[in-house]
Image (cartoon, rainbow, N blue to C red):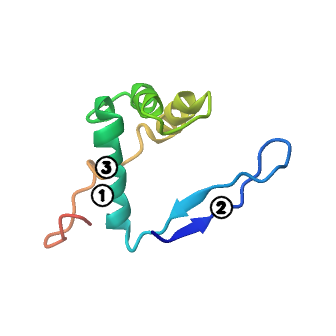
Amino acid sequence: QDATEGGDTDAAGRPIRQRFRNYESLDEFADSYADWVRRRAPGAIGEQNARTFAQRLQAGGYATAPHFAGLVEGTARQFQGLPGAQATPMPAGAPPNA
């Protein structure tokens, strides 16, 4: 499959060789990500706690950063209490994926 080379470096400035898949659409990416979670981190599916969700993703091999779960939890806390899709009704006739 076609892929795009990444340009990240490690802490010492050495290039990190990475390949990133190109997706035709956001839906294709979402389907691919959901499939990965189902296969590698099924315990994350339906998890409501951000830290536990991230820990289960990490256990499946999703992230290698040692503080990944804490970072995800901190980000989730920033959004707690903000109006979200569940609190905002969609206008009449809006498509279900809007």
Question: Is 5 placed left or right of 28 in the picture?
Answer: right
Q: Residue at x 47, y 35 (%)?
A: 61
* Disc on res. 34: 3
Asked if marks 3 and 1 touch (Cβ < 8 Å), the reply is yes
CA distance for labels 2 and 3: 23 Å
Mark 3: which amino acid?
Ala
Residue 38 falls in which quadrant of the image?
top left
| SS for callout 2 | loop
Quadrant where the image shows the N terminus: bottom left
Disc nearer the start of the sequence (2/1): 2
Residue at the spot of label 2: 6
Disc nearer the start of the sequence (2/3): 2
Labels 2, 1: front one: 2
Q: Residue at x 18, y 70 (%)?
A: 95
Looking at this view, is 80 or 23 the one in front?
23
Q: Residue at x 47, y 37 (%)?
A: 76
Residue at the spot of label 1: 31
Q: Position of residue 68 (x, y in %)?
A: 56, 32
Q: Residues within 10 Å of mark 3 (few under 14, many from 20)?
A: some
* Disc on res. 17: none
Q: Position of residue 98 (x, y in %)?
A: 26, 66
Q: Position of residue 39 (x, y in %)?
A: 30, 40
Mark 1: which amino acid?
Asp
